[in-house]
Amino acid sequence: MDLTNSRDIDNWTPLMWAVRVCGKWDTRSSYRLGIIKELLNHGADRMVEGEGLGRTWTAYELAWYYNLDKEIIDIVTPTPEELQKVSGEEHSALWAYRIKSPKIKGRDGPSDSYCDACLMMLNDIMHSCEICENFRLCFKCYRSRNMIHAGHAFYVWREDEEYEGYMDTDLSSYASGSEESSIG
Ligand SMILES: [Zn+2]
Ligand SMILES: [Zn+2]
């Protein structure tokens, strides 16, 4: 059974997972390029779009978000032929926009901050449990919070240039479960 293009609950494929960064656990980041090449050799689809919070993600945009090397960004960039196959004017325009300006560029977070569900690095947005000490979810796992961590409310932390550790006080959209974040 070929799982190269299998999807998780958010429509994410192994290629999309392979470009995410985990700063802890002695992850051998030197293997990343090889893993991505292997997936692509097995026919991993560069055009997959996975769900995020109020937006979709592609492997290409994730590679930017996690500050990966240019070599990796280059090989996950859809080819002109692949882009040509996109059907629908709106969808083509979306892809053109993505390629032109991907580019929410995440900053390297502290290497010890990670999501308690998927263990991937928390970049500049994280969701903290209001009840449990030090239980945090990344933007992806937050989508599945009702399965992962049911019954506890979360608040969102964002870090931007000016407000290190700034806490978003407008929590209503998160508490109610609507998904308006432009980051996640
Ligand atoms: Zn996670
Ligand atoms: Zn909790």
Image (cartoon, grey):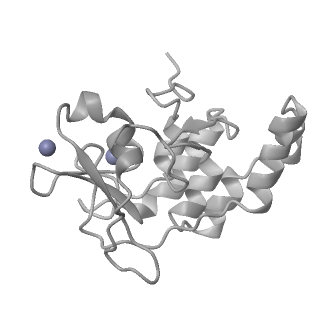
Task: Give the percent coordinates (x, y) of residue 1.
Answer: 49, 15
The residue shown at (22%, 43%) is 153
Ligand 2, seen in the image, is in the quarter at: top left
Viewer-proximal residue, 84 or 53?
53
Image label count: 0
The residue shown at (72%, 52%) is 77
The residue shown at (85%, 45%) is 93
The residue shown at (80%, 61%) is 100
Viewer-proximal residue, 13 or 149?
149
Task: Give the percent coordinates (x, y) of residue 130.
Answer: 16, 51
Outermost residue, top side: 1
Viewer-proximal residue, 135 or 48?
135
**Position of 90 relative to 32 (above/below):** above
User: In this rendering, would 109 be left or right of 32?
Assistant: left
**Position of 135 relative to 43 (above/below):** below
**Position of 38 relative to 101 (above/below):** above
User: In this rendering, would 109 be left or right of 72?
Assistant: left
Task: Give the percent coordinates (x, y) of residue 157.
Answer: 33, 62
User: In this rendering, would 53 be left or right of 72?
Assistant: left
Viewer-proximal residue, 161 or 167?
167
Task: Give the percent coordinates (x, y) of residue 137.
Answer: 29, 49
